[in-house]
Image (cartoon, helix red, strand yellow):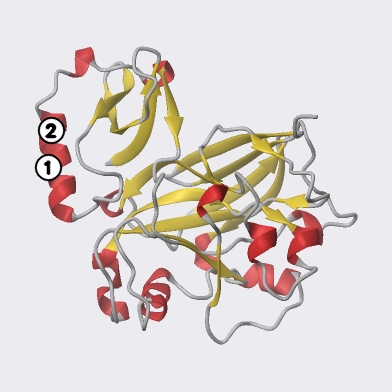
Amino acid sequence: MKLVSFSAKKNPRPQRGALIETASGQKVAPVSGGYNDLSDAQLEQMLSEINALDVTTLPDLDEVTLHNPLPTPGKIICIGLNFMDHVLEVKAQVPTEPVIFSKWHNTLSGPTEEIVVDKATQRVDYEAELAFVIGKTAYQVKEENAFEYIAGYLCANDVSARDLQFSQSQWVRGKSLNGFCPLGPYIATRDEISDPHNLRIQCRVNGQTRQDSNTAQLIFKIPALVAFLSDGITLEPGDVVLTGTPPGVGFTLNPPCYLQPGDVCEVEIEGLGMLRNLFVAPEA
């Protein structure tokens, strides 16, 4: 199942839904439950609701606007230096345990939302990332049981203000400017993705490929991340974890290439759709 947040002209308030494949194309079905209610029981309830619908009454995908499918995560947890090819690119030491930082809720934005290049930074960078969502409370989880606690997967862009990030020992400010965490376009429940560690991941800027790798390059795989994070920290339904970025980020290029107003940045992951965000200048 592919979970979305969507709005339509007749009902502009975002609501929870699911994408449905029909003979006439993709449609969007409203489903019940809170955005962070991602338990197996709730997902089964959603499927039951969808099966009872008359699909001919549902709007087509191109008739709605998709929003961030996870608007109220309790935590936004990020993993740094977690792609082997990226670690080699930046000539860093291979981490012996996951590098953890966070983003704040003001960073959240949708899969097609405009992102303002804030006046606080001159060096806005992109980071294509696979993210996963926690489906049930997780504490001291063993690696072999980790997938039981995952509701699904989605695309993320860990947009970063490099001048702010590299000016301080803590990365949070440079990672947490407004709109700097677009998510979406949907959450693919874990049954949709047979192997999250074998997905092509790409980033394009104005149609030019900047990042092109595979999640097989993850140093700390998803079970290891769940076990590490839940050892002392309770992970709750709706928490989202960004797993790290592959090589090709803007600051590593020669010369460096940062995002400018007017640039379109696309993040695409195999089986998880695409983010497409236009970066714009702040209002005068």
At 60% from the left and 54% from the top, the residue drawn is: 158
Separation of residues labelled 1 and 2 (CA atoms): 6 Å
Residue drawn at 25 percent across, 67 percent down: 137
Depth check, front residue: 189 or 34:
34
On residue 49, the disc is 2
Tell me which corner region of the image, top left, top right, bottom left or bottom right, holds residue 213: bottom right
Question: Is 40 above or below relative to 225?
Answer: above
**Residue 57 appears at what percent x and percent y?**
21, 13
Residue furthest to the right in view is: 255
Q: Which mark is residue 45?
A: 1
- In the rendered structure, the answer to whether residue 260 lies left or right of residue 197 reads right
Which numbered dot is residue 160? none
SS at circle 1: helix
| Residue 234 image offset from top left, x and y in percent | 33, 73
**Residue 101 point in image, percent of width and height:** 56, 70
Q: Is residue 144 above or below residue 47?
A: below
Q: Choose between 148 and 73: the one closer to the eye.
A: 73
Q: Are circles 1 and 2 on residues that touch, CB within 8 Å? A: yes
- Give the side of residue 96 with respect to residue 196, left or right: right
Packing grade of label 2 (10 A; few <14, some 14-19, many >=20) is some
Q: Amino acid at mark 2?
A: Glu
Residue closest to the eye, 245 or 217: 245
Q: Which x, y percent locates residue 103? A: 55, 59
Please state which amino acid type lies under the numbered disc 1.
Answer: Gln
